[in-house]
Image (cartoon, rainbow, N blue to C red):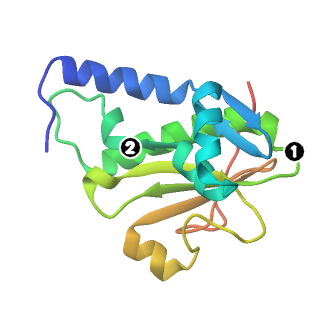
Amino acid sequence: MSREHGAGADHALNRFLEATALPAFDLGPSICIGSRETAEVMFTRFNGDLVAFESFYNSVQLSECYPLDGLPITRSLLFQIGLVIMRSWAVSLLPLLGQRTVLFYLGGRELNDLALRFHVERDGRTWFPLELSALERERLVVYRLSAAGLASLTGRPNEVVTVTAH
């Protein structure tokens, strides 16, 4: 899969830049990133299921953010784009965390399914089971953001990425 030169690459670069600059905000008990007005409308559609709402609303399809014109789209490159967006979001979320933690999910089975999403960690409820075999099958990597930083829950579980607010 590759992206031809032109408007598609420009759109993808703009989408990537927009994704890294989305504002974070509290919406009741939820933490969101993006448009408050859109989040308020979407919030009512999830009947109080905060994990489902946040995981749906706070997500981006990584293939839409591929800004490298003329180069083949690979899983590795999309994953790296996801890491950049995740770290950007983590910096935006830090001032809102308080005692809360956030789970980021990065990956997907197929190239076109690669996504980044997050939700506040609540009483053991997760968007996807945190069992290693299930995560490997779905090709997902999970990170936990706390006031201490961003730590991988899969792969290298002791790895901590220091993230600080601007």
Q: Kindly check if marks 2 and 1 are in contact, taking CB atoms under 8 A apart as contact.
A: no
Q: Amino acid at mark 2?
A: Gln
Q: Give the image location of residue 139, x and y in percent.
A: 39, 67
- Location of the C terminus by quadrant is top right
Q: Amino acid at mark 1?
A: Gly
The answer for how far apart the CA atoms under marks 2 and 1 are is 28 Å
Q: Is disc 1 surrounded by few (<14), some (14 to 19) or many (20+) residues within 10 Å?
A: few
Q: Give the image location of residue 9, x and y in percent.
A: 23, 24
Q: Please name whichever residue, 50 or 65, is drawn nearer the observer in this view of the structure.
A: 50
Label 2, secondary structure: give it. strand
Task: Identify whether 125 is placed above or below 75.
Answer: below
Q: Give the image location of residue 113, x and y in percent.
A: 32, 54
Q: Which mark is residue 122?
A: none
Report the residue at 35% width, 33% height from top: 65
Q: Which mark is residue 61?
A: 2
Q: Please name whichever residue, 84 or 64, is drawn nearer the observer in this view of the structure.
A: 64
Report the residue at 64% width, 44% height from top: 44
Q: Residue furthest right?
A: 99
- Inspect this view and state whether residue 45 appears: yes
Does residue 132 appear to the left or right of 63 in the view shown? Answer: right
Q: Which residue is mark 1?
A: 98
Does residue 157 appear to the left or right of 166 in the view shown? Answer: left
- Location of the N terminus by quadrant is top left
